[in-house]
Amino acid sequence: MMDRYHLRYFLAVVDTGNFSRAAAACNVSQPTLSVGIARLEEALGRVLFHRTNRRVALTDAGAGLLAHARAIEAGFAAAERDVSNASVVSVLRIGVLTTIPPHWIERWLAAWPGERVELVEGNERELRGRLARGRIDVALTILRDGDDRAAGQHLLTEGYALAIGATHPLAERPVLRAEELAHEPMIVRRHCEMLSETSRFFVAHGVRPPFPARTTNDERALAYVRARLGITVMPASFRAPGVARVALEGFDAMREIGLVFAGHNAPSLPLINALGEAVRG
């Protein structure tokens, strides 16, 4: 027999990418989670995951179960909310990608006349997992090619550029080539969705700079840049006093920012309009 906790374990493995992180997300031990997955596979008579030392991947049977599991879990979560919050003030739970500029959210909150909100920050994988489990109602995040656009809303497309201290000798240049940065210290934004692509770009141009700082906080990254500890690559929307934005020749990466709605939550036109105005400024 298939129980709800079996599906939650299954979704946690899909969303986190391995059994140990999935166990931590479910607050159980890894052996407990592994036994739960084994029982689910036994109940279905199919293997759901290809397991190797490095990664876990869905089998065809697992891929077939995924949409059903997400719908079932979203239904459970919606039922729980309807019962437990019947007499409670409605709260809109919004997931915010960690690389979203804070002034977008500040501008939106200052103008939002709608219901109470609860903000939850996370990376792409975390926000998608919370959406699938009904833990948030909508996510302000990056839209990907495989997304169901009927369940999302495009807000903005933007590129990336160098962030350089305003007093740096290179700050007045409109465009810089990668080779010109060979000896420039660089700040590593460890949470950046384009970190791997950025690294490959510089390596391809023979640039292997020193890294005086690594951070997962964009305000701190901007402070390091402003103090001329180093330079970094950031989405074009990040602006700050004392920081110049300079184009990086040949680096054409773009990101599409939008709203992704949970299966239990219908798109809210006022929310879309308000966030769209805040994002586009």
Image: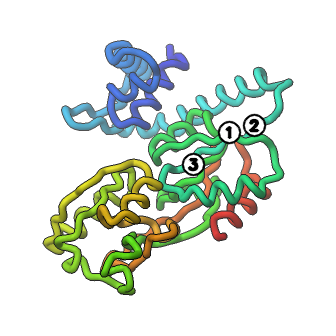
Return the disc, 3 or 1, that comes first in the chain's sequence. Answer: 3
Asked if the residue at tag 3 contacts the one at tag 2, i.e. Cβ–Cβ closer than 8 Å, the answer is no
Nearer to us in this view, 161 or 60: 161
Q: Which mark is residue 96?
A: 3
Residue holding disc 2: 91
What SS does tag 3 mark?
strand
Residue receiving disc 1: 118
Asked whether the residues under the numbered discs 3 and 1 touch, taking CB atoms below 8 Å apart as contact, a structural biologist would say: no
Q: Distance between the residues labelled 1 and 2?
A: 7 Å
Place residue 29 in its image quadrant.
Answer: top left
The C terminus, quarter of image: bottom right
Relative vertical location of residue 56 with respect to residue 207 in this rendering, above or below: above
Image quadrant assignment for residue 178: bottom left
Give the secondary structure at mark 1: strand
Position in image of residue 164 (x %, y %): 37, 71
- Is 127 or 79 nearer to us in this picture? 127
Ranked by sequence position, the earlier of labels 2 and 3 is 2
